[in-house]
Image (cartoon, rainbow, N blue to C red):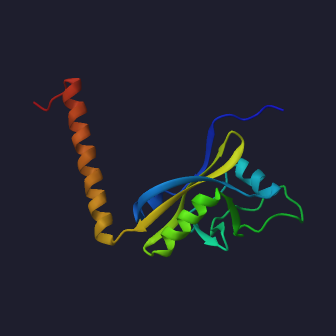
Amino acid sequence: MVKELGKKIIAQNKKARHDYSIEEVFECGIALSGTEVKSLRAGRASLIDGFAMVNKGEMWLSGVHIPEYTEGTWNNHPPRRERKLLMHRKEIDKLAALTKQGGLTLVPLSLYFKDGKAKIELALAKGKKSHDKRATLMEQQATREVNRELSRRNSGKSER
């Protein structure tokens, strides 16, 4: 059996980077059933409404939609079930303390296969207000324009 190498991204939560300011990023494993893995290998998942929480000393992922495997039988998985996340005890305790302080939440950023194992990238994030979102968009647009002008000048195509 050939072992998979590298990183294959299945799903990304681009809206999370818009709605939250990312404080810290963690990588953790995810406990899945067989049909969930097959559905992920087909490249189907949605992280839009997902969040993670600490419950009784364990990390759980909620709201992530992994659709039923089309070739599955009667033992197919429920699409929005809670899934256990695999992390070290020290990391779980640290995240539990930080989220209890208030204002911080755990948001999934991406779901991927790394060397054949399903992993999820969690972010410790703080929610943005609407004026913060507008300021971030304006910053990105200004940076894009500056980079565009610099590349234009470097290539020798000035606007004369």
Q: Position of residue 127 (x, y in %)?
A: 41, 69
State the image quarter where residue 86 is shown: bottom right
Hey, which residue is sitting farthest top in the picture?
A: 156
Residue furthest to the front in view is 90
Viewer-side residue, 17 vs 119: 119
**Is 17 situated above or below 142?**
below
Q: Is residue 137 left or right of residue 114?
A: left
Confirm whether residue 46 shows in the render: no
Q: Is residue 117 above or below residue 84?
A: above
Kindly identify the residue that appears in the image at 33 percent across and 64 percent down.
133
x, y percentage for residue 64?
Answer: 63, 65
Specify whether 71 is left or right of 4: right
Q: Residue at x 45, y 64 (%)?
A: 125
Instruction: Identify the residue at horizontal 30%, vertical 66% (top origin).
Output: 132
Q: Nearer the viewer, residue 108 or 152?
A: 108
Is the N terminus in the top left, top right, bottom left or bottom right quadrant?
Answer: top right
Q: Is residue 50 left or right of residue 4?
A: left
Quadrant housing the C terminus: top left
The residue lying at 21 percent from left, 26 percent from top is 154
Residue at the limit of the structure toward the left, as seen here: 160
Q: Give the camera-side residue of 156 and 75.
A: 75
